[in-house]
């Protein structure tokens, strides 16, 4: 899921017009060594904090259907996580960096949710809303100054971005639908295994299985007429 959020952010930033200007979008840690090797204008989107949102944890499992409408698997509920990024702009001059960061800021603050065409993989398959907050990292995330100190670099103008994304639950295959009745074999312990001795149970109260098996819809037989007792009155 994390790499799918990275790809969605990359597509979103590139759609703001940065891709056509030759600016590269990377997800590296902006350490001092990395900054020394940088040569082209770059937007760095660094993921530094991942936390689960326990308030959105569900308990009910979902069902996965095939093209014919049969249940083929059951999936545990999605778990929601908050991914916090540090977005910085790198160029030859501070004026160019500020102009580039301003362009990224205008793109991110106008986006509350990631559009479906930006999502790939499990995020696209789940079809859930992926939220985005720009301009602040919240009270629980580490401060930007602490992040820069941990990276060993000098403090730089940055933008905090938080993405709330679902992690798909574990998928377990379901048993195939029942299409035949119960088969019973009655053989002596010392007798041979005779296939003709096997018989299928007879269901007197239900109709034969349809194309969907006994699990499908069937017509019920009408209830038998009530037998009139001697003391009943005629209507």
Image (cartoon, helix red, strand yellow):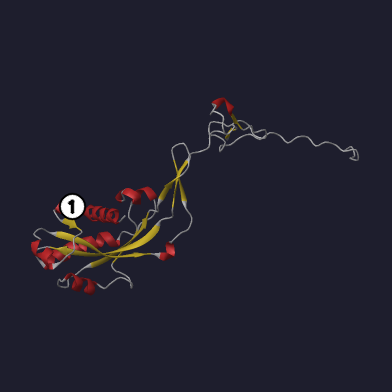
- Look at mark 1 in the image and give the residue it sits on: 19
How many labels sit on residues?
A: 1
- The correct choice, above or below, for 232 with respect to 124 in the image is above
Quadrant of the frame with the C terminus: top right
**Which class describes the residues within 10 Å of circle 1: few (<14), some (14-19), or many (20+)?**
some
SS label for mark 1: helix
Q: Position of residue 42 (x, y in %)?
A: 15, 59
**Is 211 on the left or on the right of 229, as rendered?**
left
**Is 96 on the left or on the right of 119, as rendered?**
left
- The correct choice, above or below, for 126 with respect to 152 in the image is above
In this view, the residue farthest toward the front is 190
State the image quarter where residue 225 is shown.
top right
Please tell me which residue lies in front, 174 or 105.
174
State the image quarter where residue 56 is shown.
bottom left
Which residue does the image show at 29% across and 53% down from the upper left?
A: 4
- The correct choice, above or below, for 36 with respect to 25 in the image is below
State the image quarter where residue 6 is shown.
bottom left
Quadrant of the frame with the N terminus: bottom left
Q: Where is residue 34 in the image (x, y as percent from the top left)?
A: 12, 63
Please tell me which residue lies in front, 178 or 185.
185
Please tell me which residue lies in front, 175 or 44.
175
Which residue does the image show at 90% across and 38% down from the upper left?
A: 230
Q: Position of residue 162 (x, y in %)?
A: 31, 64
Please tell me which residue lies in front, 210 or 202.
202
**Is 121 on the left or on the right of 38, as rendered?**
right
């Amino acid at each position: 899921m994390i790499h799918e959020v990275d790809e969605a952010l990359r597509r979103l930033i590139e759609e703001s017009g940065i891709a056509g200007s030759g600016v590269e979008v990377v997800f590296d840690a902006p350490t001092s060594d990395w900054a020394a090797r940088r040569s082209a204008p770059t937007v760095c989107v660094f993921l530094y904090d991942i936390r689960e949102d326990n308030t959105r944890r569900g308990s009910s499992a979902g069902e996965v259907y095939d093209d014919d409408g049969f249940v083929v698997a059951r999936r545990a509920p999605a778990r929601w996580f908050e991914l916090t990024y540090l977005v910085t702009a790198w160029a030859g001059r501070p004026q160019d960096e500020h102009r580039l960061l301003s362009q990224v800021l205008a793109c991110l603050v106008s986006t509350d949710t990631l559009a479906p065409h930006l999502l790939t993989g499990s995020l696209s398959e789940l079809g859930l809303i992926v939220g985005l907050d720009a301009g602040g990292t919240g009270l629980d995330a580490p401060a930007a100054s602490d992040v820069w100190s941990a990276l060993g670099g000098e403090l730089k103008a940055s933008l905090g971005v938080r993405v709330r994304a679902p992690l798909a639950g574990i998928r377990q295959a379901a048993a195939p639908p029942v299409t035949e009745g119960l088969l019973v074999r009655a053989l002596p312990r010392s007798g041979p295994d005779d296939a003709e001795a096997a018989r299928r149970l007879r269901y007197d109260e239900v109709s034969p299985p349809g194309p969907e098996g006994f699990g499908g819809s069937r017509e019920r037989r009408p209830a038998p007429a009530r037998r009139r007792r001697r003391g009943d009155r005629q209507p």
